[in-house]
């Protein structure tokens, strides 16, 4: 049986969700950051802890200047940009990695049915809610509801950004339909943004054969970001820690979240090797790019959108 109770995390007020298999810790004041997904059965923490001293987060801050821990929500963009569509929101600045990660969220309820947090928009008129609940042993359900509290419609992009610990070199496992990836970060190794490669064993521009399902150590000081092709949605992706014999699997509806990104940081921004599995409703990282790609969500004034995500700990 699961329980929800107040706790602390690095002297920050927090909430814990716990059952016989898992413990999840959430800090409302830090953008509702999920700071711990702990497998009690194997004594294993999936999320990286703070890599720098915690500091007050100022709205519009650079994301990579912060403590680089845990799971943050990316909304209504990932890369900073000006709101690109005409109308009353045109030209409004959307900060780095969106704005909700740098805003305090409010606790609406903390009952047995789950912990409900909410945040109100600054750059755009909205209320975003997230309900977190352990619905069965080791299974975390995250339910999101977005309400446009204004009159005019607006476009948005949401993506999960969990920085999973990759020091044990877990393997990325994807649904069998994933056979290609699209490069997002232009550079010498992977070429221009938009170039496609076979998944998971491509050759990069310098002729190296890669095992993209593997994360190397932070000593490589490298990073990469790929999306699956937008015409190839998948319903799940997982990390498998072969040393400990445990796994973490993220599941979602492709109708709600049709796009999927993989971020790997091998010591470029985070001093520990991390991997982020990022289901999303926009393609890809910048809202203006997603709008140009015509792969973005638009919510009408006074209406609501909803989506959900399951995180399943297992063997």
Image (tube, helix red, strand yellow):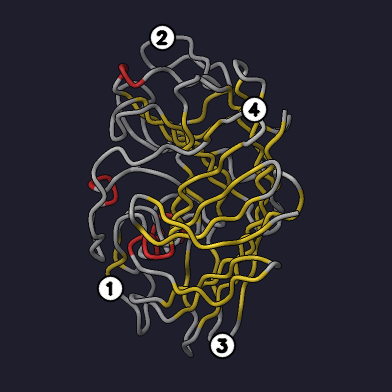
Where disc 3 sits, the SS reads: loop
Query: Which of disc 1 and disc 4 is earlier in sequence?
Result: 1
Foreground mark, 3 or 1, reads 3
**113 shown above or below 89:** above
Q: CA distance from mark 2 to mark 3?
A: 52 Å
| Residue 261 visible in the shown view | yes
| 58 and 289: which is toward the camera | 58
Query: Which of disc 2 and disc 1 is earlier in sequence?
Result: 1
Q: Residue furthest bottom?
A: 151
Where disc 2 sits, the SS reads: loop
- Residue drawn at x 39%, y 72% as measured from the top left: 85
Q: CA distance from mark 4 to mark 1?
A: 40 Å
| Residue 292 visible in the shown view | no
Residue 216 position by quadrant = top left
The reply to whether the C-beta atoms of the residues labelled 4 and 2 are less than 8 Å apart is no
Horizontal relation, residue 250 to residue 263: left or right: right
What residue is disc 3 on?
A: 302
| 150 and 265: which is toward the camera | 265
What residue is disc 4 on?
A: 173
Image label count: 4
Foreground mark, 2 or 3, reads 3
Query: Which of disc 2 and disc 4 is earlier in sequence?
Result: 4
Horizontal relation, residue 105 to residue 238: left or right: left
Residue 55 position by quadrant = bottom left
What residue is disc 2 on?
A: 207
- Residue drawn at x 45%, y 59% as measured from the top left: 14
Q: Position of residue 86 (x, y in %)?
A: 37, 77
Foreground mark, 4 or 3, reads 4
Q: Position of residue 278 (x, y in %)?
A: 53, 45
Q: CA distance from mark 3 to mark 1?
A: 22 Å
What residue is disc 1 on?
A: 91
């Amino acid at each position: 049986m699961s329980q929800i109770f107040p706790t602390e995390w690095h002297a920050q007020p927090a909430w814990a969700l716990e059952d016989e298999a898992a413990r999840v810790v959430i800090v409302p004041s830090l953008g509702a950051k999920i700071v711990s997904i702990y497998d009690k059965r194997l004594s294993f923490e999936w999320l990286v802890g703070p890599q720098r001293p915690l500091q007050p987060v100022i709205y519009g801050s650079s994301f990579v200047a912060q403590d680089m821990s845990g799971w943050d929500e990316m909304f209504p963009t990932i890369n900073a940009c000006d709101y690109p569509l005409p109308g009353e929101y045109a030209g409004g600045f959307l900060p780095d990695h969106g704005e909700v990660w740098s805003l305090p969220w409010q606790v609406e309820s903390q009952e047995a049915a789950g912990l409900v947090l909410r945040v109100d928009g600054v750059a755009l008129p909205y209320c975003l809610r997230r309900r977190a609940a352990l619905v069965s042993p080791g299974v975390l359900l995250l339910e999101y509801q977005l309400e446009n509290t204004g009159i005019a419609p607006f476009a948005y992009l949401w993506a999960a950004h969990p920085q999973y610990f990759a020091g044990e070199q877990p393997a990325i496992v994807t649904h069998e339909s994933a056979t290609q990836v699209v490069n997002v970060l232009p550079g010498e190794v992977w070429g221009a943004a938009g170039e496609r490669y076979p998944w998971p064993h491509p050759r990069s521009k310098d002729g190296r054969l890669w095992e993209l399902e593997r994360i190397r150590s932070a000593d490589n000081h490298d990073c990469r970001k790929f999306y699956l092709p937008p015409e190839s949605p998948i319903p799940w992706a997982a990390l498998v820690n072969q040393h400990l014999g445990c796994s973490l699997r993220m599941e979602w509806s492709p109708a709600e979240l049709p796009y999927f990104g993989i971020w790997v940081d091998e010591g470029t921004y985070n001093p520990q090797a991390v991997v982020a599995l990022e289901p999303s409703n926009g393609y890809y990282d910048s809202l203006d790019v997603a709008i140009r790609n015509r792969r973005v969500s638009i919510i009408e004034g006074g209406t609501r959108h909803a989506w959900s995500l399951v995180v399943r700990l297992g063997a």
